[in-house]
Amino acid sequence: MIHKTKGIVLNKIKYGETSLIVQVYTEKFGRQSYIVKGGRSKKSSMKSNLFRPFFLLEMEVYHREGKNIQSLKEVRLCENLNNLVFDVYKSTMVLFLTEVCSKVLREEEQNHELFVFLYNSIRYLDLTEESIGRFHLYFLSKLTRFLGFYPQLNWSDRKAFFDMDNGFFVEEDRIHAHCLEKYLSRKLYSLFSTSIDLVKYLKMSKEDVNVLLRAILNFYALQIDGFSNLKSLSVLHELFQEEE
């Protein structure tokens, strides 16, 4: 049966001599794999550059429940996200976040609220003229809500240490190896409590951003089996040291 759905490109790999396998997070069916026959051929109507990371697509697909690889009938761009391609900071951010999403978005079922969050976040990243040096922190913190481990924001002067195993703040006498120290716990609480338009006002140094990112990624790793070895992390870290 043919369905119309929007989709968000996560990644693509070469398949055979001229084809592609594309991973897409769809509005109707969650994460799906699609074969693009002849996608690397000059004569193909579905060119490879349609499937860049985080591109937003309008798709007509042949969908069969339980099938590992689905087929595409037609694809076109919802919007032209030129900044995600030509801005080196944004393209590097996209490289990192799509690698994260490829590891954590596993459900092959509809999740409309998650799709809207991803879609709107990508549009914001493309359109904003503000510094994006903290965008990944915001994105990763809010994504936890849809992955099922959004923390309990019970921070106080008494409960000032974040327990990454259990996702809440604890008193000093309950800290263990996977608890963040007080200063970083307070920064994490501020991050999870803020909105996209206020992230830039949080008091953080570049070192704070780097340490907080490592803490959030460790939090992900404790909650999600197999979450490790992000190849793009070093590229992100190196490039954003230069950004003011």
Image (cartoon, rainbow, N blue to C red):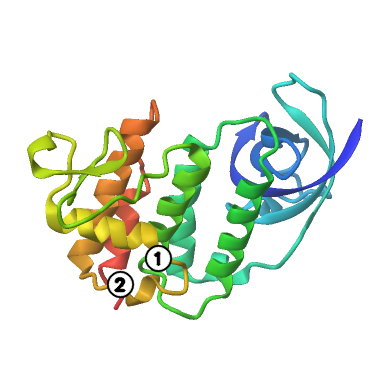
Secondary structure of the residue carrying numbered label 1: loop
| Circles 2 and 1 in contact, beta carbons < 8 Å | yes
Residue at left offset 42%, top offset 44%: 150
Q: Which quarter of the figure has residue 242? A: bottom left
Number of residues whose C-alpha sits closer than 10 Å to that of mark 2, classed few (under 14), some (14–19) or many (20 or more): few
- Amino acid tagged 2: Leu
Residue found at the far left of this picture = 173
Secondary structure of the residue carrying numbered label 2: loop
Of the numbered discs in the image, which one, if any, rests on residue 179?
Answer: none
Residue at left offset 58%, top offset 61%: 122
Of the numbered discs in the image, which one, if any, rests on residue 202?
Answer: 2
Residue at left offset 63%, top offset 57%: 119
Residue 114: percent from the left, percent from the top?
60, 47
Q: Report whether 142 appears left or right of 117.
A: left
- Amino acid tagged 1: Thr
Q: Report whether 109 appears left or right of 62.
A: left
Rendered-image quadrant of the C terminus: bottom left
| Front-most of residues 131 and 146 | 146
Residue 188: percent from the left, percent from the top?
28, 56
Rendered-image quadrant of the N terminus: top right
Alpha carbons under labels 2 and 1: distance apart: 9 Å
| Front-most of residues 243 and 35 | 243
Height in image: 238 above or below 177?
Answer: below
Residue 227 appears in the rendering: yes
Provide the residue designation for mark 1.
194
Residue 99 appears in the rendering: no
Q: Which quarter of the figure has residue 194? A: bottom left
Residue 141: percent from the left, percent from the top?
40, 52
Q: Which quarter of the figure has residue 117? A: bottom right
Q: Considering only order in the chain, which callout, 1 or 2, is on the residue closer to the N terminus?
A: 1
Height in image: 236 above or below 9?
Answer: below
| Front-most of residues 125 and 174 | 174
